[in-house]
Amino acid sequence: MNTATPLLERPSAGTAGEDLHLAPLNGPHGRVRSLDCVAGPHQLRVLQGRVWLTIEGQPADHVLSAGQGCDLVGPARLHLSAEGARSARVTLRPRDR
């Protein structure tokens, strides 16, 4: 039984377990994606490519490669982009407390 809980406040941004595809910034569809993560512990995991992650209010950015993740405590505003010339794919899921 799939009981996916929405993690992102904007429905167009995705829901729990849904992959988010990021086009390269230098490509025709490249852009920075901004996501609002709801309250609670989550994990952002890179499934493919490299991702540049900025979390509003934090001084350091993160560059993550496929297989790497970042633990988050929402609410948080995330800004993501594919790093380099290739697309990337990430997923955002709730983390066990």
Image (cartoon, helix red, strand yellow):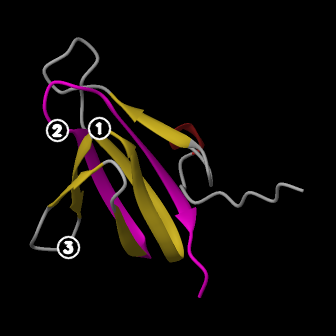
Q: How far apart, in angstroms, are the residues tagged by discs 3 and 1?
A: 25 Å
Mark 2–mark 3 contact, CB under 8 Å? no
Between tags 3 and 1, which lies in front? Answer: 1
Helix, strand or loop status at disc 2: loop
Q: Magenta includes 76?
A: yes
* In this view, 85 is above or below 32: above
Residue designated by label 2: 83
The residue positioned farthest toward the right in the image shown: 1
Q: Which mark is residue 49?
A: 1
- The magenta region covers 73-97
The residue positioned farthest toward the top in the image shown: 28
Q: Which mark is residue 57?
A: 3
**Residue at 29% of width from left, 38% of height from top?**
49
Q: Seen in the image, is 6 located left or right of residue 26?
A: right
Choose the circle earlier in sequence order: 3 or 1. 1
Residue 86 location (% of width, % of height): 23, 26
